Image: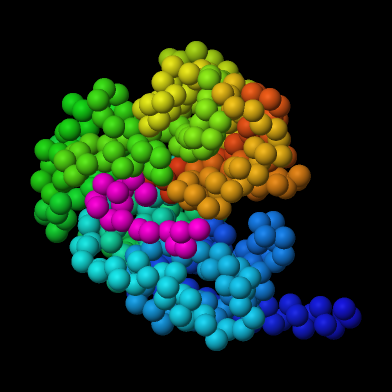
Amino acid sequence: MSADKHLQSWQERFEMAEAMQPLLGKLYRNQGVEVVVYGKPLLNASTIDIIKSHRLVRHHVGDKLRLRESFPFIEALSKLAVKQCKVDIGKLAVNYWREHKDASQIEAYMSHELGSAISHEDSEEARDVVLYGFGRIGRLLARLLIERTGVSNKLRLRAIVLRGGRKGDLEKRASLLRRDSVHGPFNGSVEVDEENNAIIANGTYIQVIYANSPDEVDYTKHGISNALVVDNTGIWKDEAGLGLHLKSKGASKVLLTAPAKGAIKNIVYGVNDSDILDEDMIVSAASCTTNAITPVLKAVNDKYGIVNGHVETIHSYTNDQNLIDNYHSADRRGRSAPLNMVITETGAAKAVSKALPVLEGKLTGNAIRVPTPNVSMAIISLNLDGQTNKADMNAYLKGMSLRSDLQNQIDFTDSTEIVSSDLVGSRFAGVVDSQATIADGNRTILYVWYDNEFGYSCQVVGVMQKMLGLNYQSLPLS
């Protein structure tokens, strides 16, 4: 191909991606339909991101998906009365072109494949959400909720609750939402309404409430009712402490973004979210590490059976550690986080059994905090009931990442060059690094990357939806 033809081909792809963008935006805002290409989200994607997502399809099916091949499916999707679901346009297009030579039957094919979502009645009411605390997870949850702004959005961020309230606090909070050293700038506009003590982000009006205790807030004064309060502070972890939220007027349920104590259910979205009942007033979304490893462990146990194992977490440092050497109540954590690897404890291995009881007592775990600000890795060493090898294990996990009930939790990479910073912004609970897999006989060692901030926050949003009875299908089913 000549140089001119390469440029012409690129221009055609670029223009096709540009034509997709308004359709993708309208599908989400007006119908609640999130379009992905083999799991890669196209919501708010740039033209380059759309092109890259199509090229990456070759890693799954052996050939790239051309934009001209997928565009008719997005057009057909925009004409269907599909609502509140995630649609993998890449899988639909690949499956279709394997069996057909022209586009004449695309609309009929789409109607058949998406039938369950077309018949879906949009009777669910929008629900109010309050973020209690506005730290790392709180601000990422805000970003995720705000990007869903539209008439079809069922999770509506109404308020954030903070301690303090000193002069200049509101602008500083808005600035932290606007700019992030790890995840980059906020995708949109953030304004401050000083007079009414509010932040306005992409048209979402967020009331800022100052309080020192969960039970002293009256949300109804701000027009908020029947709200889900998401506690990001980590201060209260048992039923007595978290129950204080339920004493506030306008609050109906509580979700903790940390492991809970006592009888509170620890939920890993995609694994045991079916355990959430209507009468559950307080639920925990477990930890980032528990969310990263549990889906992979479930997949492995379902096929091979797990006798026992050990999980070593190579975890980025967190705000709990010290910037420079200083007193800390926990062992070793007082030493400078950016300058040291720090051995510490993790309860993630034991916590897995709360989401996956079949692994009760089978796993041990430890953690090493390392001098990176985000993205972590779990090294999972397992003894299995069944026999396997590297090729079979990787093939199985790749299939689980593409065609299973865990496809929204497990991602898979076969890159020989990927490093931690490449995974910043990953929306999956965990990413299996197939190049590092070790498997022989009844033993295997798996390396699972995870964005311990953003990927975890995506899992939290899934639990929020489940708690409020907002059910979203992922299509096609295979």
- Judge left or right: residue 231 versus residue 123: right
Query: In the image as oriented, which residue stretches furthest toward the right?
Result: 2
Measured as percent of width and height from the top left, residue 29 is found at 37, 71
Image quadrant occupied by the N terminus:
bottom right
Looking at the rendering, the stretch of residues picked out in magenta corresponds to: 461-478
- Judge left or right: residue 338 versus residue 418: left
- Judge left or right: residue 162 versus residue 287: left
Of 191 and 101, the residue lying toward us: 101
What residue sits 20% from the left and 39% below the top? 280
Inspect the magenta stretch and tell me whether residue 114 lies in it: no
Of 210 and 106, the residue lying toward us: 106
Measured as percent of width and height from the top left, residue 265 is found at 29, 32
Inspect the magenta stretch and tell me whether residue 467 lies in it: yes
What residue sits 16% from the left and 45% below the top? 252
**Above or below — where is 278 with respect to 361?**
below
**Above or below — where is 62 with respect to 248?**
below
**Residue 435 seen in the figure:** yes
What residue sits 29% from the left and 24% below the top? 261
Res. 63 image quadrant: bottom right
Measured as percent of width and height from the top left, residue 48 is found at 64, 69
**Residue 327 seen in the figure:** no
**Above or below — where is 42 with respect to 100?**
above
What residue sits 40% from the left and 30% below the top? 356
